[in-house]
Image (spheres, rainbow, N blue to C red):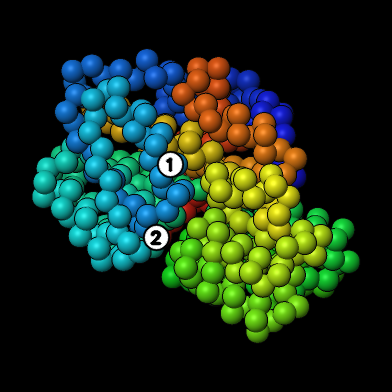
Amino acid sequence: MHSVEDPEEEVTGRRLDRGEFLKATGAVALAGAIGTTPAAFAGGKQLKGKRVGELIIVEAPFFNEFNSWLKKEFTPSGVRLTIASAEGSAQKGQNIVETFIAQDFDGIIIITAPVTGFDALVRRAKADGKYVINHSAGAIGGVDQNVQVDHAGAGAGIGRVAAGWANTKAGGRIRVGILTNLEDPDQKRRTDAAVAELKKRVRDVEVVRTAQGQSAEQGASAAANMLQAEPDINMIITHNTVGGAGAFTAATEAGKTNRDRFFLGSVDLEDAVLERIQRGTIYQVGWSFFFSYSSTLMARDMERLLLGKRVGPTRVLIGRPVTRAGVASYRKLIAQPRNPAYSKYYRDPNVMRYSNVRLRTGQNAADALKK
């Protein structure tokens, strides 16, 4: 188990030589990842004026950070990005994609949960000559590229960090509240894997409450209710940092401010959570999928598609936990996805990897990694 402390050692792990890399990830990985400095994607007049529409499931600081890197990549190429929020509504999300198709956008990016109901829209978009990249919690069949995170791997990683705290600070006895996305089996894999890891490593684990925590409001309300009904809860695990932000507010308002007596951890990571981890609050770990790098690479892959070039059909984000000791070095690394000196991380299979497996709706990262 690694926290991100040294950018070279902790983020990437062992570096594979070229032969090992090709064997592990397929030739498409190298083809998709080479030339990752901004100049390599200059489309000149060919890209100027191209329009890309992006659906996000909800407005949140996480998406503001994610999209800032998209804009930094698209703007020099002249690609125009339009972002629309579904405000948590699956139906509104489908309506937004339908509008992108009707208004003849050249490319469409989908970030939603759950992914049900988008297959027919993707078929329409492809029939109309649009390029579609899906960066949602689950795969959508028929898109040009699915970008997927290793939900279970991330959840297990958070569970290992939480287990270490339980055994050293709580005497191996924890009462756990879970905030997850009960409506999306893909995201729920995160908390399921965290619980499984806790039960494997800690002698006395009881999950006393599980609730929906997709938004900050849901996270705050559910955590407040949990802590009121079950005052012995000394750990909350959340499937994302949006719900985690609400849980942090509720827990601190309930007097849970001692990091030696209460543990909060989440999959995903954003600036506000990093700040709380660094300050030594009860928020003690987040899981980074290197989204600034993924956002940057997604923009470059969309540019390739708009130029008529091939991209790998699947890209999987692996990620690493970030604890208090590693925040400073992590900030330095994650803030520079366009720095040529860090281009190696796009090629490192311990950070992200391309796969030749073309996923169908209902499949996930595990289906791409096992082939």
Q: In this view, does 11 lie to the left or right of 60?
A: right
Query: Mark 2: which secondary structure?
Result: loop
Amino acid at dot 1: Phe
Q: Distance between the residues labelled 2 and 1?
A: 16 Å
Rendered-image quadrant of the N terminus: top right
Amino acid at dot 2: Ala
- Residue at image position (34%, 20%) is 41
Residue 134: % across, % down: 35, 47
Q: In this view, does 210 lie above or below 129?
A: below
Say which of marks 2 and 1 sits in front.
1
| Name of the residue lying farthest toward the bottom | 229
Report crowding for label 1: few under 14, some 14 to 19, many 20 or more residues within 10 A (C-alpha).
some
- Residue 5 placement: quadrant: top right
Instruction: Name the residue tied to disc 2.
Output: 113
What is the count of numbered marks?
Answer: 2
Instruction: Name the residue tied to disc 1.
Output: 66
Q: Is residue 362 above or below residue 293?
A: below
Residue 360: % across, % down: 37, 53
- Residue at image position (52%, 26%) is 336
Q: In this view, does 352 lie above or below 228?
A: above
Q: In this view, does 285 lie above or below 221?
A: above
Labelled pair 2, 1 in contact (Cβ < 8 Å): no
Depth check, front residue: 187 or 353: 187
Depth check, front residue: 354 or 41: 41
Q: In this view, does 177 lie to the left or right of 88?
A: right
* Residue 186 visible from this viewpoint: yes
Q: In this view, does 54 lie to the left or right of 153?
A: left
Q: Which of marks 2 and 1 is nearer the N terminus?
A: 1
- Residue 192 placement: quadrant: bottom right
* Residue 10 visible from this viewpoint: no
